[in-house]
Amino acid sequence: MDLQVLFEDENVQVVNKPVGMTLGDGFLGLPEEVSGIEIIAKNTLAMAELERFKEQGTLKVTYLAWVCANIPDESGQLEHLNWKKVHQVYQNTLVRIAPETFDLGIIRQEFKYIGHPIIGDQKYNPQTNYTGGLLMHSSTLQLPIPFTDEVREIGAPLPKAFPRNLRKDFQ
């Protein structure tokens, strides 16, 4: 399967990973059920730079996710992330997530903890009645380009299967 390349230079390649694929050399470590931006380091020096950017907090990723229930607030902060409401349909809310961690398990746990698990999350919301998969997408990336002073803002389009509107109350 061909990957959509969003950015590439001699040290890194940024791709739009589809659901159903795992990239063993992906820096963000997106699981099979999450689509969106993934970074591939082309050499060990670039990998070390990416790790340094990650530790400094200059490498940033945002996610879009549909969560269960109506979230009355427009934005909020949890232990490891900030979120903002993007859209609401029936009892489902689309949120933009700006995490402080690259551990998607923690992000998924935090939404479960506040009573708004991510729709389709079989691991942290096993009683989900949505069968279309985990509704989470790695949507934007702030990437300091290794060995330069350049910082790029890169976006990944939503996959066709990612709902723009959910017309049913899902758990």
Image (cartoon, rainbow, N blue to C red):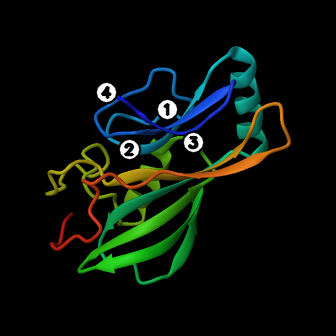
Distance, label 2 to label 1, CA atoms, is 11 Å
Distance, label 4 to label 2, CA atoms, is 14 Å
- Mark 2, residue position: 35
Distance, label 4 to label 3, CA atoms, is 26 Å
Mark 4 vs mark 2: give the one in front.
4
Instruction: Find numbered disc 4 in the image and state the secondary structure of the residue it sits on.
Output: loop
Q: Residue at x 44, y 74 (%)?
A: 86
Crowdedness near tag 2: few (<14), some (14–19) or many (≥20) residues, C-alpha within 10 Å: many
**Which label's residue is closer to the chain start, 2 or 1?**
1
- Relative height, residue 33 to residue 111 (above, below): above
Residue 77: which quarter of the image? bottom right
Label at residue 102 = 3
Distance, label 1 to label 3, CA atoms, is 8 Å
**Which label's residue is closer to the chain start, 4 or 1?**
4
Instruction: Find numbered disc 1 in the image and state the secondary structure of the residue it sits on.
Output: loop
Mark 4 vs mark 1: give the one in front.
4
**Which label's residue is closer to the chain start, 3 or 2?**
2
- Mark 4, residue position: 1
Distance, label 4 to label 1, CA atoms, is 18 Å
**Image location (x, y in percent) of residue 36:** 43, 45
**Which label's residue is closer to the chain start, 4 or 2?**
4
